[in-house]
Amino acid sequence: MYGYDQNPGAQQQYTHPPQQPQQQPMGGPGTGGYGEQPLYPEPSPPSLGDAVRAFTTGSLSAEDFQQIFATSKVYCPRGDNPGFLALHNTQQPVIPMFSTLKELRRYAGKESKYFVITGAEVIDLLPTGYGFVLDMEGDHRMVFDAKAVEQMVDFAMRRMYG
């Protein structure tokens, strides 16, 4: 019984709840019960930097790269106004983007402003007619022109909607 005594003739007094014995999680200690670290953690997906290196060396397919890109964080330099910063001194306007904060800092300096979005958001928000450069100052720089971006959008739509 919890709370007050339910006997009508007895004086109302608070009674302590009965103590429950401590129980081990199912399977005993250290077997991956709720809230515990699993014994064999899931392997982490490749980083965007790893995917860039693998794709540029030909050891990763375009489809696999796009799947990794879609879920990865992308670091973008920014100005005082919201939105992407574009480079217009190229054949087509491109937007510099980086796979890591370290790569962005190498390009734009330690005190530069930036924002972080996913690759899927990049594909969704990139203005029509623009391409992007991934890891511009890196060892494995990748340039995606506007046509390549359109193909990435088509791939994302087919994957999402069939």
Image: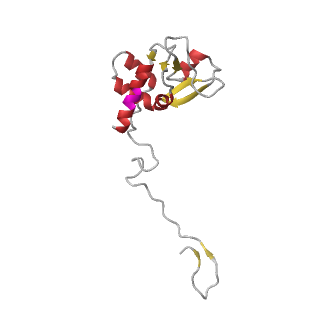
Q: From what the image shows, is residue 90 above or below residue 44?
A: above
Residue nearest the observer in this picture, 53 or 62? 62
Please give the name of the residue rendered at 47% of the width and 48% of the height, measured from the top-left corner: 35
Q: Quadrant of residue 66?
A: top left
Residue 80 vertical placement versus 33 (above, below): above
**Residue 108 point in image, percent of width and height:** 60, 17
**Segment tinted magenta in the rendering:** 152-156
Taking 96 as reference, is 12 left or right? right
Choose between 41 and 140: the one closer to the eye. Answer: 140
Farthest bottom residue in view: 9
Q: Which quarter of the figure has residue 38?
A: top left
Chief secondary structure of the magenta portion: helix
Whole-percent x, y for residue 138 in the image: 49, 14
Q: Identify the residue at the far front of this view.
A: 129
Question: Between residues 104 and 142, which one lies in front from this camera angle?
Answer: 142
Q: Residue at x 46, y 31 (%)?
A: 120
* Coloration mode: secondary structure
Residue 154 falls within the magenta-colored stretch: yes
Q: Position of residue 85 (x, y in %)?
A: 58, 21
Tell me what residue is drawn at x 41 percent, y 20 percent.
147
| Point 57% across, 24% down: residue | 84
Does 41 appear above or below 36? above
Q: Quadrant of the C terminus?
A: top left
Tell me if 53 is positioned left or right of 94 in this view. left
**Image quadrant of residue 43?**
top left
